[in-house]
Image (cartoon, grey):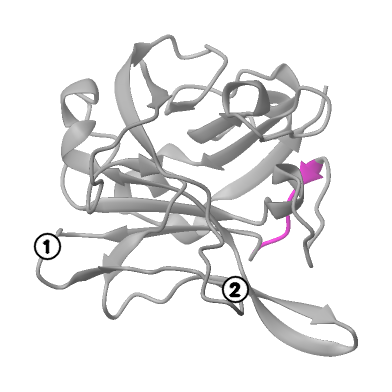
């Protein structure tokens, strides 16, 4: 079984909780991921978009096979600014994305005293991130569409391109307000099951299927 992700607005403070958008809450020694881009002839470090963080205790009851960590925090980042309607120094279309345009991070333990929110602000110190959403989890079918962890990619084209990989995180633009992944597209972060088990996050691949 896969794990369905449902998003909802909330007034709760989601520090060190599972959340979508907003700002990641990370250990002090964890670096916010960036990608090298050229802007007006100058090479700069451009921050990836923070997608979500998952408090792994929330998903443990839905993962009886232990494919995912059951403690600590998982983080997902990707170069999706343009798909959110923002001007972006990056631009990746359909197909497999180059390394560096998506990043998975993991903290083995959550510590409310040492974790800190990594906030991105503009030149006027105004937040650059969208309002955070609370994440709720439930079971779903392996081949279901929508936002989910585990299972298989819902697009046959993606599965054909990576037959030996499973879905790590699936994003469907129709399920996230403001996110447009081409024409009803789906972005899958994919990983081999053995790499998932050993925490080899760097072996994750990203594939955007635009229908």
* Image: magenta residue range: 95-99
- Between tags 2 and 1, which lies in front? 2
Q: Residue at x 69, y 53 (%)?
A: 81
Image quarter of the N terminus: top left
The quadrant in which residue 117 appears is: bottom left
In the rendered view, does 70 fall on the left or right side of 31? left
In the rendered view, does 2 fall on the left or right side of 189? left
Q: Residue at x 59, y 63 (%)?
A: 48
Residue 148's disc number: none
Q: Provide the residue designation for mark 2.
A: 122
- Nearest the viewer among 142 and 172 is 172
The x, y position of residue 190, in whole percent, is 55, 40
Q: Is residue 83 above or below residue 103?
A: above
Query: Dot 1: what SS?
Result: loop
Q: Provide the residue designation for mark 1.
A: 112
The x, y position of residue 26, in whole percent, is 29, 66
Q: Is residue 144 magenta?
A: no
Disc on the earlier residue, 2 or 1: 1
Q: In whole angstroms, how far apart are the C-alphas of marks 2 and 1?
A: 27 Å
Image quarter of the C terminus: top right
The x, y position of residue 100, in whole percent, is 63, 66
Q: Is residue 166 visible?
A: no
């Amino acid at each position: 079984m896969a794990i369905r992700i449902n998003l909802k607005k909330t007034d709760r403070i989601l520090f060190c909780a599972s959340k979508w958008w907003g700002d990641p809450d990370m250990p002090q020694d964890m670096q916010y991921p960036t990608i090298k881009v050229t802007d007006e002839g100058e090479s700069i470090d451009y921050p990836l978009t923070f997608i979500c963080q998952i408090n792994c205790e929330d998903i443990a009851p839905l993962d009886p096979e232990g494919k995912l960590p059951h403690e600590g925090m998982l983080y997902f980042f990707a170069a999706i600014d343009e798909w959110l309607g923002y001007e972006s120094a990056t631009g990746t279309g359909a197909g497999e994305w180059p390394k560096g345009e998506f990043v998975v991070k993991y903290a083995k333990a959550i510590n409310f005293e040492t974790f800190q929110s990594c906030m991105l602000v503009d030149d006027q110190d105004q937040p650059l991130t969208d309002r955070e959403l609370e994440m709720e989890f439930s079971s779903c079918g392996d081949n279901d569409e929508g936002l989910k962890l585990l299972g298989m990619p819902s697009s046959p084209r993606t599965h054909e391109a990576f037959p030996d990989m499973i879905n790590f995180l699936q994003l469907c633009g129709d399920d996230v307000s403001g996110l447009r992944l081409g024409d009803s597209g789906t972005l899958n972060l994919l990983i081999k099951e053995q790499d998932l088990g050993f925490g080899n996050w760097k072996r994750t691949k990203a594939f955007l299927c635009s229908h």
